[in-house]
């Protein structure tokens, strides 16, 4: 197979299909989504069989247990996939929304209309459910999609892709609105991220390694999600009970998620009071504490933190801790060490809380709440295609709206410029 | 001079200064802008002298007349530059705007806060007034700026930069909030567009050649403006008087601007009626018509258009003309040949107009209005840093808001995720 030629064909088809997707009205898109969900439910056994083949091959290839786990589809998982697609059908359609139309002195009316981005390339690893999720979100937002899943999941993805094509066709849409790359050749990714004429944005969903590599090579804009090195800062005016509760939830509810807190900052004026109970709670839960000298003086279990620890997303029961002079130092530390994902302050002081909210340069900034809330569902987006740690276009959880942009519209009555 | 080291220093200083710019309140930013304008007025003679030196050198180097014209500052131009800066001071501050704050079932309140992008790199050619314009817009939107003007304008830009620094310092801001690259070495551009750690977005202002080159090499997101191949489509239901008036204004008001119409499409059902008077008007104004065979049959002055002509932004008294079957063909033609800048329909038919509005994939889409309206001032943005023909982040005229993004904010009261 000539990969370049194959990808050019896929790209050209996607561009053509994107016109149909953009034109499709809400009902047509929803009909397609409902039909996709129905096909997934009906084909559950075939999907599980295809997934079984992927798992056999993956085990033979010695894939590590965590990846095998993410690759595995269950009956419940297939049902959840179908439900997820139906939930997207139930979301409001962002396309065509007209906003802010105002008369100008020249007599024209100027406003904005929300429109699809065009063609979205999604590059992801192991989890086959992303195929259905991403297809649903791209379709509902009026975009065409090119999906490139992990090679270990290719049989599962093929089976899901057949359901997606069937649903599209049932609603009278071209089945090229969603295309799943049907080759495991890695050269396909290289093509996908450089076809500017056919692809409008790349959304990578995967580990930091994948994203760094794409970032270095992509010629197409990316909605990127790097790491989640999230902070909780216990301010001079922190409420002790809220502090304990928020650190516990932010650090220990789940260790492997990107909105888990990885670093704790404590104002010096309260360190002796707040740190010992927080450290006791963490230690009781088996969390390793890596702290500065002041932390170590207050917490006997604390190991010494290295400079590198403060930059690290542990994704594990480990937390870095630092005693800081106060709000200014906390903000400066976060703006330097954070991955600009999600950072929270615990404080009863209005001015400190508002300064933190404004000055911390992260995609989600929180007052008296757990960083674990940084999530498309918790924010009310209904679904998310990813979490952007970038500043352009979309920050934080990206839902349907993040897969659209606004064009200008001008309504006139024969107006000309003077 | 070690260009890489120099640019790294500029980048590091810009990143540090961006914190101060983001923190600055509206009054402080406005005080700086007023002081910059005052310094420009006071130093008018020095600015004109520096510009005179640039012009002497440019003439000696054989710069072409159009570029010399754009390089030239006049007394009136300097006054306009100062006024422009004051106008930016008068605009509302987008930074810190909080929107859409809503309670979620979990008890948290979620909303969005508008924040600066960080560090903006502007790369531009001849016109020295861009130095003051861009400095003002970046500062008002809370960003730090790195400005790289054309080498032919370096003396003028240096003189303006001194006024900008003075104004920043007068308001108590670091004078590194706006830095003008003080070298004509082209390697500086190569560094600027690859310093991801220091630069958040690049805004190029210049010809298509400059932008294509930057696009090929940039590792930093760009708010790009390629060409303006704008269309006017005279629909089956066009009002003849409006059609004539709009084509005249869109094509002939100014030939060299990006929102000038370069191509005219006419519905077949009305071509025999509408084309001859429109062609007569254009011919009388000295506009060369390059048309399809049907156009040539109706308009004796019309030359034959090549396929390439339909892709061309002439920036000259030349227009391409095509007779089309109707709305569907017009939309398909525009979506293929247009540069996605600005396209207009002339029609009294509601359904045709609304379909055009929705289906034409351009940054500005107009009904019964001249494409010449596509402009930040006409749209009420107060000022513009450029016009984006891209789809990500910002489309069309980009004002202060386009130099910001929205982060998520969460207001809690000790909330944790269940």
Image: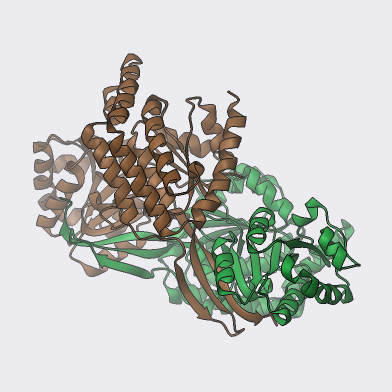
Chain colours: A green, B brown
Q: Is residue A183 above or below residue A354?
A: above
Q: Is residue B340 above or below residue A37?
A: above
- Please give left or right for residue A305 compared with residue B390 in the image: right
Q: Nearer the viewer, residue A309 or B68?
A: A309
Kindly identify the residue that appears in the image at 9 percent across and 43 percent down.
Answer: B281
Kindly identify the residue that appears in the image at 38 percent across and 52 percent down.
Answer: B31
Q: Quadrant of the N terminus of chain B?
A: top right
Spot occupied by residue B357 in the image (x, y as percentages of width and height): 31, 62
Spot occupied by residue B374 in the image (x, y as percentages of width and height): 28, 52
Q: Quadrant of the C terminus of chain B?
A: bottom right
- Pick out the residue farthest to the top: B60
Q: Nearer the viewer, residue A189 or B294?
A: A189
Spot occupied by residue B145 in the image (x, y as percentages of width and height): 48, 44
Marker count (numbered) = 0
Kindly identify the residue that appears in the image at 13 percent across and 40 percent down.
Answer: B282
Q: Is residue B275 above or below residue B413?
A: above
Q: Nearer the viewer, residue A355 or B238?
A: A355
Kindly identify the residue that appears in the image at 41 percent across and 30 percent down.
Answer: B158
Spot occupied by residue B208 in the image (x, y as percentages of width and height): 39, 36
Q: Quadrant of residue A96?
A: bottom left
Q: Quadrant of residue A104?
A: bottom left
Is residue A8 in view? no
- Please give left or right for residue B46 compared with residue B103 in the image: left
Q: Nearer the viewer, residue B125 or A180?
A: B125
Is residue A168 in view? yes
């Amino acid at each position: 197979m000539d990969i370049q030629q194959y990808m050019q064909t896929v790209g050209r088809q996607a561009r053509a299909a994107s016109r149909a997707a953009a034109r499709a009205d809400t009902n047509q898109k929803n009909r397609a989504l409902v039909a996709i969900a129905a096909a997934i439910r009906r084909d559950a056994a075939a999907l599980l069989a295809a997934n079984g083949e992927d798992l056999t091959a993956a085990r033979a290839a010695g894939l590590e247990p965590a990846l095998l786990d993410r690759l595995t589809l269950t009956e419940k998982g297939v049902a959840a996939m179908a439900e997820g697609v139906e939930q997207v059908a139930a979301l409001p359609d962002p396309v065509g929304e007209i906003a802010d139309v105002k008369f100008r002195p020249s007599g024209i009316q100027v406003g904005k209309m929300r429109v699809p981005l065009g063609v979205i390339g999604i590059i992801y690893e192991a989890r086959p459910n992303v195929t259905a999720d991403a297809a649903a979100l791209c379709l509902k937002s009026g975009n065409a999609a090119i999906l490139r899943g992990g090679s270990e999941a290719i049989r599962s993805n093929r089976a899901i892709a057949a359901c997606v094509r069937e649903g599209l066709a049932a609603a009278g849409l071209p089945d090229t609105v969603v295309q799943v790359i049907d080759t495991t050749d890695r050269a396909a990714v290289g093509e996908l991220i450089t076809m500017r004429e056919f692809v409008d944005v790349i959304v990578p969903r995967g580990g930091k390694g994948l994203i760094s590599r794409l970032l270095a090579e992509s010629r197409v804009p990316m909605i990127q999600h790097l790491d989640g090195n999230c902070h909780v800062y216990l301010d001079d005016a922190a409420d002790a009970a809220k502090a304990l509760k928020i650190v516990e939830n932010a650090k220990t509810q789940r260790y492997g998620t990107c909105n888990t807190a990885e670093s704790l900052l404590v104002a010096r004026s309260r360190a002796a009071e707040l740190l010992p109970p927080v450290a006791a709670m963490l230690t009781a839960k088996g969390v390793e504490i890596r702290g500065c000298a002041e932390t170590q003086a207050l917490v006997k279990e604390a190991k010494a933190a290295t400079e590198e620890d403060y930059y690290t997303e542990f994704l594990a029961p480990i937390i870095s801790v630092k005693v800081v002079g106060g709000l200014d130092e906390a903000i400066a530390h976060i703006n330097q060490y954070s991955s600009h994902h999600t950072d929270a302050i615990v404080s009863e002081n209005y001015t400190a809380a508002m300064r933190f909210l404004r000055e911390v340069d992260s995609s989600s900034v929180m007052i008296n709440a757990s960083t674990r809330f940084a999530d498309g569902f918790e924010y009310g987006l209904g679904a998310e295609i990813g979490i952007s740690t970038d500043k352009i276009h979309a920050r934080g959880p990206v839902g349907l709206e993040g897969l659209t942009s606004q064009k200008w519209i001008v309504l006139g009555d024969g107006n000309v410029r003077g």
